[in-house]
Amino acid sequence: MIFKAEPLTAEAFAPFGDVIQTAGHGPRMINEGTCQRFDDLAPVDVLASGGRPLISIFKAAPRPLPFEVRVLERHPLSSQAFFPLDGVPFLVVVAEDSGAGTPWSGRIRAFRAAGDQGVSYRRNTWHHALLAIGQTSHFLVVDRGGPGENCDEVAVDPAVLVTV
């Protein structure tokens, strides 16, 4: 199967999580009127089983296109958010759950995030690991630290191709 990445919109991505973007959100002015602050762009769900928030920066090498999706993962104890720091678009691959605790390979969706959009995957959302495209890119990541296993991985068999 070949999936073409569609533009990332809040409506299309809603079954999987939240799009992190300032568009459509009104700021409040702070710092003596010199700074716009955009609050509450996505929920952070990391406290289950003694978890704590982690803020990290990932440096991701670009993936070749078309990209072959062979593995999907999910995080049963937390949400996970990615926001690009270099203004470079990236790919987002998600799948609906089959109802048996595995991704439904026939319901994979691919999105092309603009360089000013991030994503926050809800807890237990099947997704591919970070997919930089075009160039090495940096991402601000908010996820969970703490005890407990928080990453399930499964093979996608047969693998599917994603293109833009």
Image (cartoon, grey):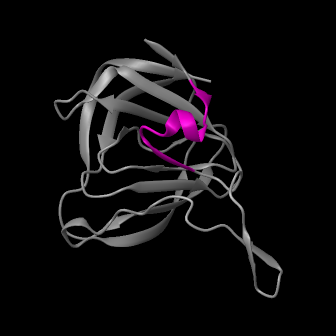
Range of magenta residues? 5-19
Write the residue at 66% across / 67% down.
Answer: 38
Write the residue at 42% across / 43% down.
Answer: 129
Res 62 seen here: yes
Horizontally, residue 85 falls left or right of residue 158, namely: right
Q: Is residue 53 magenta?
A: no
In percent of width and height, residue 24 lies at 70, 51
Asked if 141 appears above or below 162 in the picture, the reply is below
Asked if 84 appears above or below 91 in the picture, the reply is below
Q: Is residue 12 magenta?
A: yes
Horizontally, residue 155 falls left or right of residue 139, namely: left
In percent of width and height, residue 89 lies at 66, 41
Pick whichever, 27 or 70, lies toward us. Answer: 27
Horizontally, residue 19 falls left or right of residue 16, namely: right
Residue occupying the far bottom of the picture: 32
Write the residue at 60% across / 68% down.
Answer: 39
Asked if 52 appears above or below 2 in the picture, the reply is below
* Number of numbered markers: 0
Horizontally, residue 141 falls left or right of residue 133, namely: left
